Amino acid sequence: MLPKQLLTKIGISSILLLTGSLLNPAIASETPNYVEGTDKAAVVFNPLQVNNFSMRMSDHDFSMLTSDHVNWSYEGPWLRTVMSFTMAGKVYGPYTVGVHLKGAWGSWRDINGKAAFKIKMDAFVRNQTLFGITKFTLNNMVQDPSYIHEAVTYRLFRAMDVPAPRVGYANVTLNGRNYGLHLNVETIDTTMLARWGLDNEHLYKGGVPNFPDFYSGSESYFQVEDGSETSTSDLTNFMRINQKTGDDWWAEITQYADIEEIMTDFAVEAHTGHWDGYPFNHNNFFITFDGAGYAHMIPWGTDQTWGGGIDYFGSGTLLYQRCQSSNDCREMYLQVLAKLARTASSLELDEMVGHLSSAIRSEIIADPWGPGIQTASDYQSWTAWNTSNQEVALANMAAAWDTGVSDISVSGETYPVDQTIILKPGSKQAEVQAIPFQPAATSESVTVSYLSAGLNFAEVPVTSADGQHTNSQTVSIYVLTNRSSSAALAYVPNRSAIAKVGASKLSQLKTKLKGSTELTLKFSMPKSKNLSLAAAQSLLDKRASLVVNNLRTNGIKVKKFTKVVTASGNPSTVTVSMKYQN
């Protein structure tokens, strides 16, 4: 990696002449879809699409957004504003919303500069949202000449299963003034946390002006973003635990925090050069506690990244030092770094840089507050080069201790590592072996001889290439059971349509058969007196086909089915006999 001093001395453009342009669309693959999630808000956070926020407020309120009235430590009240939002040519609104400025020491600008904004949809209209979003956060990117650092960095966090915001882009105007291209960052709030499966009870923000750490008595240095302003027992307990060290610390912290997720955050911050987060500056982080006091940390403020990696083992924070005091935590952190090396490579972040740069190029040119397209392009190319450089450096460092597993071999067949292996009924034993990511790492073959019907677990040892690290891969094995049952489905007389009570029975049947294999069905229906045998067979064909198609539509595979018309019984009832394995 080139030192930052050398980069400054010879210039970014010279680096590009040496390495070649990394933003050349000819070398990029087909543009991927960077939209994540299935919630209503997902479409808003598409980093390849630039939307528009158009706002208008009274002249008096506009004047209240100058440095005479607000600053980075005092955002002021929500000011009534009429806002319209445009996405893909469709205008949403106008809405009456609340607006104030945002930012911190380095990024804060008042309304006479390139201001950053927060928009609160329900500040004046109760329960008002837009795409399910209550609050928009629009970053001005004045500390990121590339315009892309946050989009790239947060994607890596999310890929490593660290709760992190999604992003999109938007041009912003207020009272007819063009404030240029902004980053629309998903706001860290209860809605965002719930999407990650986190039941937020208390949300704190750490950073300027106190730059807090988790020492006892530091509660007042944190800003309460959500939850009680006065009762901070969850944070106090977290601080109490972190006064311990070694095995004592490890035994208790694992009961009150997702410490692997937290240390993954540290690893990604070092990898991306995020010097302004918690691990390296006690800044730009959130910590959330659920009702049980269980903690998760969320990164923030990643605009000044990709200037060069930071020492993965150089954090001086209390949490990192406590991790290093525990053998279990130290080993876990090394395996996190190995996983990070693999994940970063798989994301092709250098190509993402190219796609983002192309998507927002015209908006960068039009931004009256920006550094200019040449400067932005230079920083984008440097970012692309640095993502590749960091991947190679970390991969070379972590390969020797990596105990990660790519696949599982069971009795000679290969399966994905996270898949439950299904074995036929009556299986009593299996030969199980892990296939490591690193070719020089090894795994012993384990004979599992205690298999029983249903779910079984096997532990398979893995040893790193340097022989210094061992891990145990848990393998899930499900032994099927031969089963048989029957159900009676009610139909409308002399028609193929299923009756209401029959539909309820069919719904129960689908639940019962979900995930089954080797399913065979036999449909039996008595012939009514007013139908010929041929007509009865035709009716049964239709009834059976509708059931089979309904099952298949719901992902239930039917191996084969047969149909029999019987002599006696209720002709409006079809009996379904089933044989299957699950």
Image (spheres, rainbow, N blue to C red):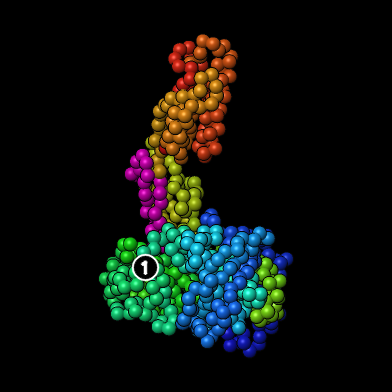
159 in relation to 537, above or below: below
Q: Could you tell me which residue is drawn at 51 percent across and 13 percent down?
A: 528
At which x and y percent is residue 101?
Answer: 53, 77
Q: Nearer the viewer, residue 402 or 281?
A: 281
Q: Nearer the viewer, residue 457 or 309?
A: 309
Label 1 environment density (alpha carbons within 10 Å; few <14, some 14–19, many ≥20): some
In the image, residue 574 lies in the stretch drawn in magenta: no
Q: Could you tell me which residue is drawn at 67 percent across and 67 percent down?
A: 359
In the image, residue 473 lies in the stretch drawn in magenta: yes
At which x and y percent is residue 314?
Answer: 43, 80
Q: Which residues are magenta?
A: 449-477
The residue that disc 1 covers is 227
* Residue 244 occupies quadrant: bottom left
Could you tell whether 506 is left or right of 52 in the image?
left
Q: Residue furthest right?
A: 26
> Could you tell me the amino acid type at mark 1?
Gly
Q: Could you tell me which residue is drawn at 64 percent across and 61 percent down?
A: 91
Q: Could you tell me which secondary element the residue under label 1 belongs to?
A: loop
